Amino acid sequence: MSTLLQLFFSFLQVGLFSVGGGYAAIPLIQNQVVEVHGLMTLAEFTDLITIAEMTPGPISINSATFVGMRLAGIPGVLLCTLGCIIPSFFICLTLAHFYYKYRSFQGVQTVLSALRPAVVALIASAGLSILMLGLFPNGFSMGLSGIHMVEGVIFLGALFLLRRYKLNAITVIFGSGVVGTAAYLLLGLL
């Protein structure tokens, strides 16, 4: 199967099975692109997710666009993005019809409540995966020798600023980038 068809069917699966929004799609995209088909490394994928996170728009579609561009150029962009969008479009269209018809039934509310924990677990899994790659790029080890201290300090500082002072996330992301760049420039010069 050609790379373009692999990409289209991979993102078609992502579009079909990612329940809960863009962040829930990240582990599915990672599974398809990195683990199942081996089209890129985890480090390359993490870089693409970082860029997709920083650009405007839904992260799953941005991720599909960036993965498609990285692996197959403009045709890859079109097929990955369409593969990601088509299932959602038809599923939403169908669900909207049934939801408006049956929204007063208790069973509908029960199903929606039951899906929330699964969505939280998928988002937590994606976040933990990216955090572990940032802190332990050579694999997890029990000692502190394998941890990247700069990333750890920036993560803890950002988490503290977000939770304690409720700063704007964009400000914290930008500040983390400035601090990280300065730290690596200073450490690179030493």
Image: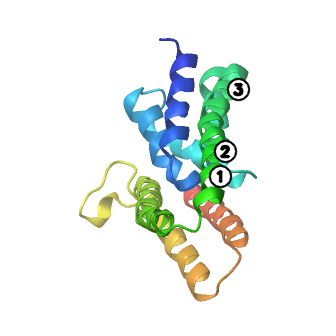
Whether tag 1 and tag 2 are in contact, CB under 8 A, the answer is yes
At x 54%, y 76%, the residue is 159
Residue 183 appears in the picture as rendered: yes
Quarter of the image where one finds residue 77: top right
The residue under label 3 is which amino acid type?
Leu
Q: Quadrant of residue 166?
A: bottom right
Camera-side residue of 39 and 84: 84
> Which badge, 3 or 1, is on the more N-terminal residue?
3
Q: CA distance from mark 3 to mark 1?
A: 26 Å
The residue shown at (61%, 36%) is 84
Of residue 100 and residue 185, the one placed in the foreground of this image is 100
Residue in front for this viewpoint, 94 or 26: 94
- Residue wearing tag 3: 78
Q: Nearer the viewer, mark 3 or mark 1?
A: 1
| Left or right of residue 26: residue 177 | right
- In the rendered image, the vertical position of residue 121 relative to residue 2, given as above or below: below
> Tag 1: residue type?
Ala
Instruction: Give the image location of residue 137, x and y in percent.
Output: 40, 50
Residue 44 seen in render: no
Q: Which residue is mark 1?
A: 96
Toward the left, the furthest residue is 142
Residue at position x 49%, y 75% in the image: 156
Q: Residue under circle 2?
A: 93
